[in-house]
Amino acid sequence: MDSLNEQARIEVAIIGGGVIGLACAFYLAKNGHEVVIFDPAPGRGASYGNAGGITPGWVAPTATMSTLRALPRMLADPLSPLVIRPAYLPRLAPWLWQFALSARAHRVEAISKALASIAMSSVQAWEALAEDAGVSHLIRQQGLLYVYAKSRTRTGAQPAHDLRRKRGVLLQDVDQAWLQKFVPTLAPEYRYGVFAPDAAHVVDPGALCDGLLNATESLGGRLQRLAVTDVALEPTGVRLHTAKGSWLAERIVLACGAHSKELAAQLGARVPLDVERGYHAMLPTPGLELPTQLLDGEGKYALTSMRDGLRLAGTVELGGLKLAPNYARAQQLLTHAKRLLPDLDLRNPAYWMGFRPSLPDGLPVIGFAPDSKRAVLAFGHAHIGVTLAPVTATIVADLLAGRQSSFDIAPFSPSRYA
Ligand SMILES: Cc1cc2nc3c(=O)[nH]c(=O)nc-3n(C[C@H](O)[C@H](O)[C@H](O)COP(=O)(O)OP(=O)(O)OC[C@H]3O[C@@H](n4cnc5c(N)ncnc54)[C@H](O)[C@@H]3O)c2cc1C
């Protein structure tokens, strides 16, 4: 089957083994399909270094008028929570234009509804997937707490919280006394909070991917540690080309995250996929354990107690796939976190940068390729790929089985920018 010749045939090939591809692979293997995952380094892309949040309340889009108003400031300060690398600006311009169009009030409302339709059930979807795949021990349901030191920032966040409440997200406004009682290690200057009790988080996103891969392999799924260089539609399947030969797959799922654009184009889908680069700093001996995931309303990053330390992760840098990382952005997370948690032990930090795969409207691409029902596209999950992995996998499994999905997938159409 895996001989390196032109005749090798497989039933379903998953291109890309991040959390999205692996969740799809697991569901498809569980449904009895013969599955082969192609990825030179599964579970080591964005799905490795993220903040681990399973966040049903991520229903307030990034593209808003207030983000647009802040753009000039972002160009000036390379360390602000959202920056544009000037060298990348010319290439980014068409994406930014579409981003600006997404910020119109009626689009914000539609995008928020579309996000809610797939994000609100994410914790329950993860519970089911995690139990089936044997990774429940990696998920904690401890909520998410937004914290603010300045009343101005708290007020600025109100429209996003209003939108979350409008979509049905459970949020509790909490005061300084509540914050001190719940998170005694929090600096007293943090006086405003909003608690989302329904959120959960993963305590080791890399191990979560490893667990999904193991579970898929135990159902007969296989891994080819190879990058797919090209895909081509043929009358009886989709041909995958790699440096070590080609395979003919009856059907494929394209889930290469930030690296999906060119392969999608070969399947007839021209999507304005770009990347929102994010950073993390991992503290192996933080000296404290948080009772919930925190989101710093000023620094715009999450603080997550994980199995092997405290992870500070987030911020957005628009700079494409090729520019060198600016690790000063990860280092400054330490300064922010020390202000928030004065007892924090900052020794031996490890830094990381990863690529969120992002469409200008912040919605993923989930659906058949325009040119063939043999190919399903599943990428572009931006800030919430961990959150959306099980729901995405359910939709993909339904599409490949010819079943009607219980989700309305029109907003995620690969052709929506055509
Ligand atoms: C700092 C940061 C914090 C985040 N925090 C959260 C959070 O708290 N909650 C949340 O839900 N989301 C979060 N995210 C977003 C989330 O990490 C991503 O949306 C998600 O990991 C995307 O998963 P993916 O499988 O599409 O991509 P990836 O994890 O990047 O996987 C893509 C895979 O494709 C493979 N690949 C690439 N090209 C090829 C090829 N040609 N052939 C074969 N394989 C290929 C790569 O090796 C990789 O393994 C965060 C992201 C960042 C950067």
Image (cartoon, rainbow, N blue to C red):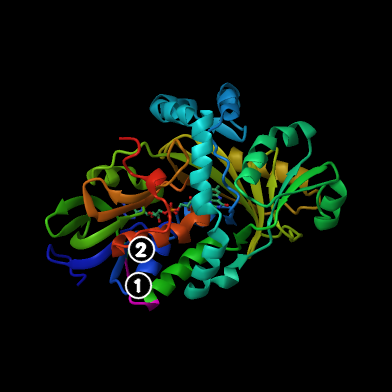
Residue 224: which quarter of the image?
A: bottom left
- Figure check: 403 above or below 294: below
For the residue pair 124 and 347, the one nearer the viewer reads as 124
Secondary structure beneath disc 2?
helix
Magenta part of the chain: 218-223
Q: Earlier in the sequence, mark 2 or mark 1?
A: 1
Q: Which residue is mark 2?
A: 397
Q: In the current view of this chain or complex, which residue is farthest to the right? A: 177
Is 221 one of the magenta-colored residues?
A: yes
Q: Residue at x 44, y 40 (%)?
A: 275
How would you rate the neighbour count of disc 1 (Cα within 10 Å): few for under 14, some for 14-19, many for 20 or more? few
Q: Quadrant of the C terminus?
A: top left
Instruction: Tell me the amino acid under the disc marked 2.
Output: Ala
Circles 2 and 1: CB distance less than 8 Å? Answer: yes
Q: Which residue is mark 1?
A: 31
For the residue pair 88 and 263, the one nearer the viewer reads as 263
Q: Which mark is residue 329?
A: none
Q: Position of residue 34 (x, y in %)?
A: 28, 71
